[in-house]
Amino acid sequence: MELRIEQGETKGSTYFEDEGKRAAEMTFSIASAQLVIIDHTEVSEHYRGQQLGRQLLDAMVQKARDENFKIMPLCPYARSEFQKDASIQDVMR
């Protein structure tokens, strides 16, 4: 399985692809150069319990640190992970 990030001008997604199909995906909107909004996370039923959602979030957190932007987690899953884990709150808005 391969983790990928696709990004356009206003929207993007971080996802795992397995044999040509998306196993898990986190979508986001680009509000500005300084703010990205995570709006949805979904893991295919077959892949649940493998921490794929968290790996997608960790990829977004690293991207935010590398590119110096903040994340607004509107997605319930992302918001919950940010609230539970102080080590990633440096990129939360």
Image (tube, rainbow, N blue to C red):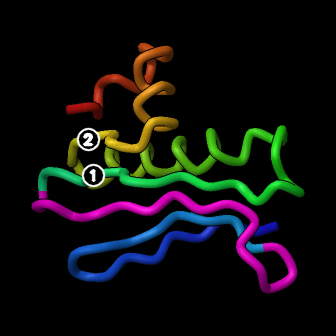
* Residue of label 2: 72
For the C terminus, the quadrant is top left
Q: Amino acid at mark 1?
A: Ile
Between discs 1 and 2, the one toward the N terminus? 1
Residue at position x 89%, y 57% in the image: 46
Q: SS class of the residue under badge 2?
A: strand
Q: CA distance from mark 1 to mark 2?
A: 5 Å
Numbered circle sitting on residue 11: none
What crowding class fits label 2: few (fewer than 14 Cα within 10 Å), some (14-19), or many (20 or more)?
some
Residue at position x 22%, y 75% in the image: 10
Q: Is residue 56 above or below residue 87?
A: below
What crowding class fits label 1: few (fewer than 14 Cα within 10 Å), some (14-19), or many (20 or more)?
many
Numbered circle sitting on residue 37: 1
Residue 63 lies, in percent from the top left, at 39, 53
- Main secondary structure type of the part rendered in magenta: strand
Q: Amino acid at mark 2?
A: Met
Residue 76 lies, in percent from the top left, at 45, 36
Magenta span of residues: 18-33
Tag 1–tag 2 contact (CB < 8 Å)? yes
Q: Residue furthest bottom?
A: 20
Asked if residue 25 lies in the magenta stretch, the reply is yes
Closest to the observer, 69 or 84? 84
Horizontal arrangement in the rendering, residue 78 relative to residue 70 (left or right): right
Q: Quadrant of residue 17?
A: bottom right
Asked if residue 34 lies in the magenta stretch, the reply is no
Residue at position x 27%, y 64% in the image: 29
Q: SS class of the residue under badge 1?
A: strand
Residue at position x 50%, y 26% in the image: 81
